[in-house]
Amino acid sequence: MIASVRAQSRRPRVICHMMSSLDGRIVTDGWPQSEEGRRQYELVHESYEPDGWICGRVTMEQHFAQGLRSDAEVARQHHGPPREDFRAPGEHESFAFAVDASGKLAWEDGDIDGDHVVAILSERVSDEYLASLRERGVSYLLAGARDVDLPLALEKIGATFGVRTLMLEGGGRINGGMLRDGLIDEVSVLVAPVADGRMGTPTLFDDDGADVTPRRLALEAVERRADDVVWLRYRVEAAGASSAS
């Protein structure tokens, strides 16, 4: 029965792909690394030949979006009937998905270095915001009443855009949320030869829920790469799985 349900699922295979310090921190600013060492992240990303990548709102705000909407704009919420998802016209071969429950991110257009931008929103965002996304050629998916329903969002990503391999490259919170919901199939970590030590910075997986359950990972491969970077690949085992005795 479980195999039958999984076969019918449209959600893509999800690889959580990150670079971390030896102590698990992921803010790379200030790390003593060579350019070749840093380049390993993109080289490994490309080796998966993914259809798209996904990040949370904070990562998108810091690196990719064109700013934030005002508090007054975000405060305008929709209270009417459900609305349709939107796929912008044109042919798109690769995608950048931004998880942004309340519609805080401002976009000038629907492109990030050749990847088509798709906003993943909750139903509460206003009609005005959706109209502005359509005008700028940004696609969007509505998933969840007030917070983004991650399982539903992934199903829609697969069904609407045909994405089969998706790289999760977010901050600790979205990574932790996806892990908690059992939505990660593989973890790909490039461990930099760096001991960070800065307290309060994000780690690979952060989850502030009251019922967080540690997950078992199965090591698939280890590879030493340039500048003493080590690439670790893990399969995420089913919840409750334990190592063989």
Image (spheres, helix red, strand yellow):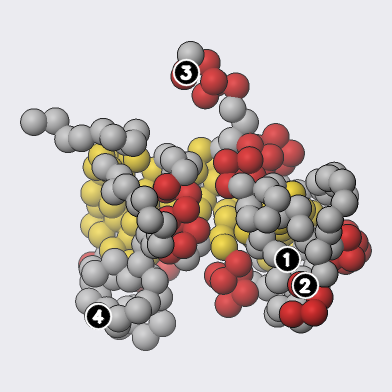
Q: Which kind of residue does numbered mark 3 sit on?
A: Ala
Mark 3 or mark 2, whichever is nearer to me: 2
Question: Vertical placement of 191 versus 154: above or below?
Answer: below
Q: Earlier in the sequence, mark 3 or mark 2?
A: 3
Q: Are marks 2 and 4 in contact (CB under 8 Å)?
A: no
Q: Which kind of residue does numbered mark 2 sit on?
A: Ala
Q: Are marks 2 and 1 in contact (CB under 8 Å)?
A: no
Q: Which kind of residue does numbered mark 1 sit on?
A: Gly
Disc number for residue 113? none
SS of the residue under disc 4:
loop
The residue beneath circle 3 is 3
Q: Earlier in the sequence, mark 2 or mark 4?
A: 2
SS of the residue under disc 2:
helix
Residue in the picture at 74% in, 80% down: 71
Q: Which kind of residue does numbered mark 4 sit on?
A: Gly
Marks 2/4: CA–CA distance:
38 Å
Disc number for residue 103? 1
Marks 4/1: CA–CA distance:
33 Å
Residue in the picture at 17% in, 35% down: 243
User: Which one is in front, 197 or 102?
Assistant: 102
SS of the residue under disc 1:
loop
The residue beneath circle 2 is 75
Q: Quadrant of the C terminus?
A: top left
